[in-house]
Image: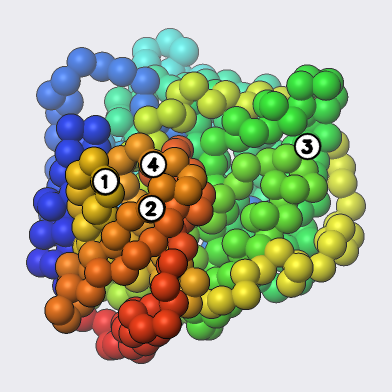
Amino acid sequence: MSERQTRGAQGRMASPELRALRRLRVMSTGRWHAPLDARRAPTIIAVGAAADGAGKSIVACNLAASIAGLGPRVVLVDLDFRAPRQHVLLGVPPQDGKDGKDGAEDGLEAWLERKRVRRDEPARTTPVRNVRLLSGTASAAPALSVRQALVRELHDLDADVVVVDLGGENRDDLFDFFGTNAFRLVVTSREPRALEATYAFLKSAAARAERKHGGGAREVLARFSGGLVGNAIEAPEQEETFHAFSRLVREHLGIALPVIGCLTNSERIAQSIVARQPLTVRRGIDDNVRQFHHMAEAIMHDSEAPARDCELDGEPIDVPIAPLPAAIDGYARKNVRYPVDWAATLEIETGSTAVRVRDVSASGAAIETTMTLQVGDPAILRLDQLPNRPAVPVVVKNVVPKSNRVGLGFTDRRRVPPRLVAAARAAQSRPSS
């Protein structure tokens, strides 16, 4: 879908329930725009990974840029103390510990000490519009109490959204300090060892919940506000691995960790690192850019996040990496799902509404809508962007309110569905614009 088509699709989807999101041009002079509304606590998005090399820093950087493209003022905080990378990814000079012009001479820890006295905020401007960077110099992770104080200060930053890149040394901070009014992202590849490490990481969260909440642990974990980002897939068929893993985690640990994005291996990502520009602000639209935009929109539309607190703080519980408790193939769907971004109309007995089709398989489709639907509701899905606007009879299979996602099942799979799958598959092989 071209940028023009995307903007048109978003315009058609506007409704009183879903705040219209207008994507801005995000490359500019890096000017920081003063707030126009009353001051309120920013939305916190913490990005972590269970294993090194998962790509969390790239996810954090591009997600920050994509959210900024929707209008909010974003501060990207690099809490990867051992190997901070965000200044490289954004093309910002490193913090050398000598330049006091930005108020962060000795990094985050020194800033924290000065902020207690004169309320310094050393977030630096970047070449990406509406994005500032807060980072320190490479060092060992500060003491737990210092990191906790740092995270508390994030809520006072002059920003609408704060995206935090957590390092391997302090990955447990994802559970320690981001329990309330925060969205927690876990990044992983589909390699067996990476999935096993991620499962062990999440199992430690479940153990913390049992220690802290006892018999109410499952209820608390069900309020886990966050999602899974799959990285480094080679083909759409491999995306199902992450969805299967998500279902396995929900069944065995009780953690609601839906897949909110899957990224493919791409030369453009490597090129963006060399160019010191986030992929989402470079020329051209590919599947990864669309995924980052989708993640940004899904998170910014998640109005229930403030009410879904999931406190898991306390002493870390070490869970050794071990084989998964069940074969992941047993949780995979039979039909391959192909990600798409199509505008469509959903027609039900009481009316119709514009929706966004997110993936298609031989058995059904996933859509985004703010319309209230119930499992079992019959409907007609009209594909507005495809030739002749085919109308497909469907039935609601599942509803995920927190992400406005609805799973639809095709009630007649004989004629139109194969055409939809073919169109979705063709879209995957189409060159990037």
> For residue 378, which numbered disc appears in the image?
2
Judging from the image, what secondary structure is the residue with disc 3 in?
A: helix
Q: Earlier in the sequence, mark 4 or mark 2?
A: 4
Question: Three-letter amino acid code at disc 3?
Answer: Ala
Residue visible at 30% across and 30% down? 159
Judging from the image, what secondary structure is the residue with disc 4 in?
A: loop
Residue visible at 86% across and 42% down? 318
Real-space Cα separation, disc 1 to disc 3, in angstroms: 43 Å
Question: Which residue was labeled with disc 3?
Answer: 206
Real-space Cα separation, disc 4 to disc 2, in angstroms: 10 Å
Mark 4 and mark 2 residues within 8 Å of each other at the beta carbon: no
Judge whether 24 appears above or below 338 on screen.
above
- Quadrant assignment, res 287: bottom left
Judge whether 25 appears above or below 191 on screen.
above
Question: Three-letter amino acid code at disc 1?
Answer: Glu
The local crowd at label 4, few if under 14, some if 14 to 19, many if 20 or more residues have their Cα within 10 Å, is: some
Question: Which residue was labeled with disc 1?
Answer: 349
Real-space Cα separation, disc 1 to disc 2, in angstroms: 8 Å
